Amino acid sequence: MSFNFNKKILISFVGINDGGELIGNSDGAIYSALKNDSFDEVILLYNDNIVSKHSFKQILDYLKNKLISEKLVKNVKQHLIDLKDVTDHNEIYSKLKKITDTLHKGEDVSYTAAISSGTPAMQVCWILLAESGDFSSEYPLKLIKVKDPKFGASQNIVVKLDTALPRILRLQNELVEIKKNLIPLLELNIKKGTVNIGSFVVDLSPIEFSYYRYFCERQINNEPLEKYSGITVSLKFMEKVYSFHEETFYDLELNRDDLKKMIKREEELTITTFRGNVSKINKKLREVLNNEIVFNEYRVVSEGKRGAKFYGIKANPTKIKIIK
């Protein structure tokens, strides 16, 4: 599918070399990228740390003034991206995505990320953002690297994920491992009845919390997905959910009274009710996380044929922490 875009926007981290004359160097990748091709707007992402004698904010201001004075771009925008560790893929990716999620995307605008500036970890995060579709599944993010003028005529080279940046992409398995590391920690607090995934709070009802704890504990114990066949759910599941509900929400006895009566009568819970609660859990996870990669790690999956399905969580057990 092709689009006729009207507005071209370049986006990049501000690197040390973008300081140019300010730091006694030749002009950096962002300046070169805008000399090589025309853009209507540039979005500069900076981390306000001090390198040598200058901060990245000072480098940004120098670059911004130079771009405007030489009329290389019509509009320059800036975003502070507060990073404690510029080599931490997890921190960079989550904060980068938070910024790019706010950008307008549509047929009227195209985005290009210049990935030559910044740390190698930042470059990898640009690649992951484009490759995963997290930037936009409908309007892909274009990636370019800038050929340094000292190696001949400068040019903007489109990054092809299967061939470019051998230093970063020399092993595809590295990207797989990085993706795993980008998954935030899930913390399920039994005393408080809360579920936190990274900085996100998932507001589950008491019964939903009890269901979710059940599947979290199974995954921590390296138990396989659990099979649910027929039209009811086992008493074992109901008893576990009841005990979890009682432990965390001990003052809400009336809320579990029906479940208690069913267990005493050995009356199994209908699969329809079970699936309904699982769907509510997944809906809340999707709405809060707003990230398909993380959502797919922590949702309660349902696999198999109708009438005999397997349920559970597939996240790495090391990413699940139950606080008692």
Image (tube, rainbow, N blue to C red):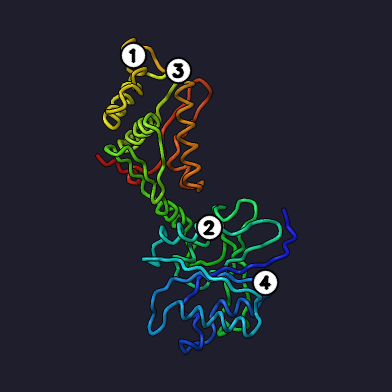
Q: Residue at x 40, y 33 (%)?
A: 205
Residue ID for mark 3: 270
CA distance for labels 1 and 2: 50 Å
Q: Earlier in the sequence, mark 2 or mark 4?
A: 4
- Point out the frontmost of discs 3 and 1: 1
Q: Could you tell me the amino acid type at mark 3?
A: Thr
Measured as percent of width and height from the top left, residue 20 is found at 51, 85
Q: How dense is the environment of label 3, judged by Cα within 10 Å: few (below 14), some, or many (20 and up)?
A: few
Q: Which mark is residue 143?
A: none
* Residue 199 in the image: above or below residue 46: above
Front one among 145 and 55: 55
CA distance for labels 2 and 4: 22 Å
Q: Which mark is residue 40?
A: 4
Residue ID for mark 2: 129
Q: Could you tell me the amino acid type at mark 1?
A: Lys
Front one among 210 and 156: 210
- Secondary structure category for the residue under label 4: strand
Residue contact between numbered discs 4 and 3, judged by CB atoms under 8 Å: no
Q: Residue at x 43, y 30 (%)?
A: 311
Q: Earlier in the sequence, mark 4 or mark 1?
A: 4
- Secondary structure category for the residue under label 3: strand
Q: How dense is the environment of label 1, judged by Cα within 10 Å: few (below 14), some, or many (20 and up)?
A: few
CA distance for labels 2 and 3: 41 Å
Measured as percent of width and height from the top left, residue 103 is found at 59, 59
Q: Could you tell me the amino acid type at mark 2?
A: Leu
